[in-house]
Image (tube, helix red, strand yellow):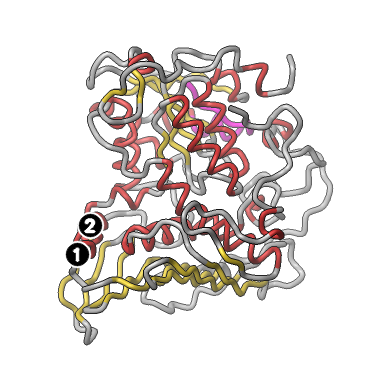
Amino acid sequence: MNNSRRSFIKKSAFGVAGMTIGGMGMSAASYSRIKGANDRLNVALVGLGRRLGAFIEPIALKESNVQLLYLCDVMEKQRQNAASRFADAIDYTPALEVDVRRIYDDNRVDAIIDGTPDHWHGPGTCYAVQAGKHVYVEKPCSHNPREGELMIEFQKKYGKVIQMGNQQRSSHQSIEIVNEIHNGAIGVPYKAIAFYSNARGPVPVPVKAPPPEGLDWDLFQGPAPRQDYMHDTWNYNWHWYGWTWGTAETGNNAVHELDIARWALQVDFPERVEVAAGKFHFPDDGWTMYDTMDATWWFPGNKIIKWDGKSRNAHNTYGGGRGTIIFGSDGSVFVDRAGYKLFDRRGSLVRERSTGDDEGGTALGGGGNISTMHVVNFFNSIRGTEAPKSPIDEGVKSTLLGHLANIATRIGKGFDVNCNNGQALDRDALKLWSREYEPGWEPKL
């Protein structure tokens, strides 16, 4: 078997000829396998790590009317754990699979939920829609800006629903207050501060080691260039061990809050980005990325978004571990996954709403109410009964803000941006616009 992912894609999906269905950009041909809003969807869950719990309830709900065909992960113990957890929620047994390419080849699969590491998100989504699948992809939706551009191109060509897992877009309270902001609740919004404060501890210094038992290291790397395994890489610390797999904290958590800021301010692409970032904690540990970042993006219309990211200092700067504050000419709003608080211009509380949700805060989480709503929205978007709460073109814009900040950090300077399309206007920045891929794994239209 050829190791290239393209050997698994024997024919491209259904194309986009013919009329579109339900305003979703979905062709009649690609929709023909779904014969009505109440028909069952066959899904595969790929990547069974810390976000596993977010998908059990929406898949198991009778109202979702989905059949879980596959549980897929490159680590054997995660496949076994997922099978055990789903056994308590569903009355059938999905197949366990190590190689996602076999899922691409299975024509029974309608949709893939992608909970893999960052370096798989963009390519994996492209491979999946090319093979005829709809995709729910966790944030950040891409590893670099070019992958975001490709995802939009693939969506347009193949007409599949692609939704990013920025689940706060499905929070009723967030939708309510953002709509009120748009309707003038705080006057003219002009600034947003997105923030995250956590107390992550030291991580091991990576040393060359055999891959852990049960791990397919080659498939973990997937689209990334091959390298020797280093101790503790696969289990979450890939986030902090260089740029091969991860996108640092800005990709890991900032995208959630930056998305709310951009949504509230109704802005798309910035005109400029400036960043101050560094590693300030546990100087001798294995963490190779920045752990602290202050970033600012300037947008047309004299609007700005600021990011205050503290991965390893949990000082409660803003009244919560994570969230977004939106300032307007007549007031302000504090919004997070727990709800919102609306203030007048003098800082007096006007109204507050609580979600009663169970997935706020900064602890490593496995889902909750808004994740369930977001995944169910994805299922219904495939059926054409709802519009996606976070279509990929919106997800790409919010993810791009994180990429721009990361690039500014890596090249050591801020730079101007084309506010019409998000392209960096800096030669050094453009050198990091894409990445090197393992030969044969490049996503190509």
In this figure, which residue is indicated by the disc labeled 2?
173
Residue at 35%, 38% (x, y): give it: 375
Left or right placement of residue 350 versus residue 32 in this view: left
Name the residue nearer the viewer: 197 or 147.
Answer: 147
Residue at 82%, 52% (x, y): give it: 207
Give yes or no for residue 439 being in the magenta stretch: no
Residue 93 placement: quadrant? top left
- Circle on res. 35: none
Residue 188 placement: quadrant? bottom left
Task: Answer above or below: position of 437 versus 158.
Answer: below
Q: Which residues are magenta?
A: 70-82
Q: Callout 1, which amino acid?
A: Arg
Crowding at mark 2 (Cα within 10 Å: few <14, some 14-19, many 20+):
many
Name the residue nearer the viewer: 172 or 432.
Answer: 432
In this figure, which residue is indicated by the disc labeled 1?
353
Give the SS element for disc 1: strand
The mark nearer the N terminus, 1 or 2, is 2
Q: Callout 2, which amino acid?
A: Gln
